[in-house]
Image (tube, rainbow, N blue to C red):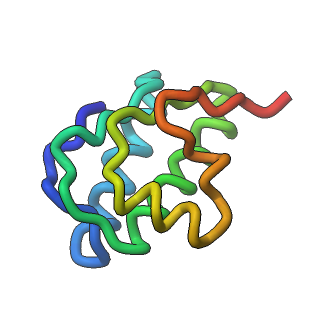
Amino acid sequence: MKLTADSITNLNAAVLREQGAAAIRSGDARIDFSAVRRCDTAAVACVLAWLRDARAAGRPLELVCLPDDLVSLAKLYGVDQLIAPGTPAAPAN
């Protein structure tokens, strides 16, 4: 799924979270952030929810072109290892 929003904030996170969940349910194993220019903490919550969705579906999820501010927030919250850009998150065993 290629995100088309230029930001992920508390204003649009619920909609984007559901779009990502629907993509994962349909088998899309890649989320492309190349259009995203600005993030707040809601973006971290979305990514973590998508990772849980993918794990529940038994699929790896690849996150690509993560914006610098999302990576920085993930480091701040200690979840940067979970969302390393381009590295598929392993499904649950």
Residue 23 image point, x, y percent:
37, 34
Residue drawn where x is 67% and y is 37% of the image: 55
Q: Residue furthest right?
A: 93
Residue 2 image point, x, y percent:
24, 34
Residue drawn where x is 38% and y is 33% of the image: 64
Residue 63 image point, x, y percent:
45, 35
Q: Is residue 68 above or below residue 2?
A: below
Residue drawn where x is 44% and y is 45% of the image: 21
Quadrant that contains the C terminus: top right
The reply, left or right, for residue 44 in relation to residue 35 is right
Q: Nearer the viewer, residue 38 or 1?
A: 38
Q: Nearer the viewer, residue 23 or 71?
A: 71
Q: Residue furthest bottom?
A: 10
The reply, left or right, for residue 54 in relation to residue 5 is right
Quadrant that contains the N terminus: top left
- Evaluate whether residue 45 shows in this view: no
